[in-house]
Image (cartoon, rainbow, N blue to C red):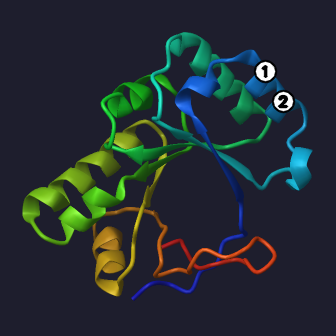
Amino acid sequence: TISENTCASRTRRAISCAYCAPKSTTRTVSNSPAAGGVVPGRLLIELTETAEIEDLAAAAARVEKLRRVGVPVCLDDFGAGSASFRYLRDLKVDMVKIDGAYVRAATKSGKGRAFVASMRDLAKSSGAETIAEMVETEEEAALMMELGVEFGQGWLFGKPAPMTEAGPKRWRF
């Protein structure tokens, strides 16, 4: 079963990887993490692969600047896009969110489990923790725990709700 550990809620902001490169994005977040009512220390930037990063070296420097001011960075939907592995190799991120399609596949076959375990190993070797997306059943949660994934996200832990209703949810395995 899933442990009852709770974790303080973080405000997540998903941004396209392409937006990681402009100086203005990093300057805005790093100079004022409390902008928009976000409590410092509770912001997490999720990089989505909606567009290719043109200057990976500049993006890596900006990711590192965010991390230095205490804003953790997560690669979202890992494995879904063609650049996921290059981004994991070249960007120092704190978390890797394994795409939900791989979580689903892991419950159906040994090959699917091997993919999740390999993604977890790659993330760990890069110094990042892992999050399983779209965890909806106790079976999926138990399997992710067995495979060494540290965190889960999905309807098993709570349905989407307005921020005023959201409180700490159990999401650490």
Q: Which residue is mark 2?
A: 28
Q: Position of residue 158 (x, y in %)?
A: 56, 81
Can residue 34 be seen from the camera position used here? no
* Vertical side of 136 occupied by 38: above or below: above
Q: Position of residue 30 (x, y in %)?
A: 82, 32
Q: Secondary structure at mark 1?
A: helix
Q: Is residue 33 at all visible to an observer of this figure?
A: yes
Q: Amino acid at mark 1?
A: Ser
Q: Camera-side residue: 143 or 107?
A: 107
Q: Residue at x 47, y 72 (%)?
A: 154
Which residue occupies 81% across, 76% down?
Answer: 164
Which picture quadrant has residue 8? bottom right
Q: Are marks 1 and 2 in contact (CB under 8 Å)?
A: yes
Residue at image point 76% right, 81% down? 165
Near-viewer residue (87 or 80): 80
Mark 1 residue crowding within 10 angstroms, few (<14) / some (14–19) / many (20+)? few
Dot 2 crowding, Cα within 10 Å, few <14, some 14–19, many 20+: few
Residue 23 left/right relative to 5:
right
Q: Which residue is mark 1?
A: 24
Q: Could you say which quadrant of the image residue 124 lies in? A: top left
